[in-house]
Image (spheres, rainbow, N blue to C red):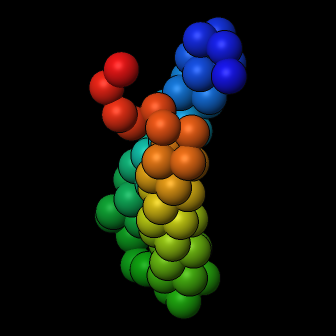
Amino acid sequence: MTEKEKELILAWIVNEQLRIDQELSELRQRVRFRRIDVADNFEMILLQQRAADFEEFSRVLLRLLRLDMPY
């Protein structure tokens, strides 16, 4: 794997994590001052699970590609 490919993978992971964090922040802001219903709770659970799944996927991917180890 070339250095450019490694950089692209790392950039994608960072951007995806930032996007998920932004979605979580926006959802929290939307429900902050209003009555929360079942749909809001379900959306929050799904988004939190997606964030956790992506974090685990990223860890496994970096381990497999040996990108988390210093060279």
**Residue 42 falls left or right of residue 35:** right
Q: Is residue 37 above or below residue 65?
A: below
Q: In the image shown, does 43 or 38 lie closer to the viewer?
A: 43
Q: Residue 3 at x, y = what percent? A: 59, 11
Instruction: Return the residue nearer the eye: 46 or 10.
Output: 10
In this rendering, position of residue 37 left or right of residue 35: right
Is the N terminus in the top left, top right, bottom left or bottom right quadrant? top right
Quarter the C terminus occupies: top left
Position of 67 with respect to 50 (left or right) is: left
At a point 66% along the width and 14% down the height, the residue shown is 2
Q: Is residue 57 visible?
A: yes
Furthest toward the bottom, the residue is: 38
Between residues 8 and 3, which one lies in front from this camera angle?
3
Question: Is residue 40 visible to us here?
Answer: no
In percent of width and height, residue 42 lies at 56, 82
Q: Residue furthest top?
A: 4
55 lies above or below 15 = below
Q: Which of the 4 quarters of the picture holds residue 28?
A: bottom left
Furthest residue toward front: 71
In the rendered structure, the answer to whether residue 42 lies left or right of residue 48 reads right
Residue 18 sits above or below residue 61 on the image: above
Which percent across, then down, holds residue 40? 53, 76
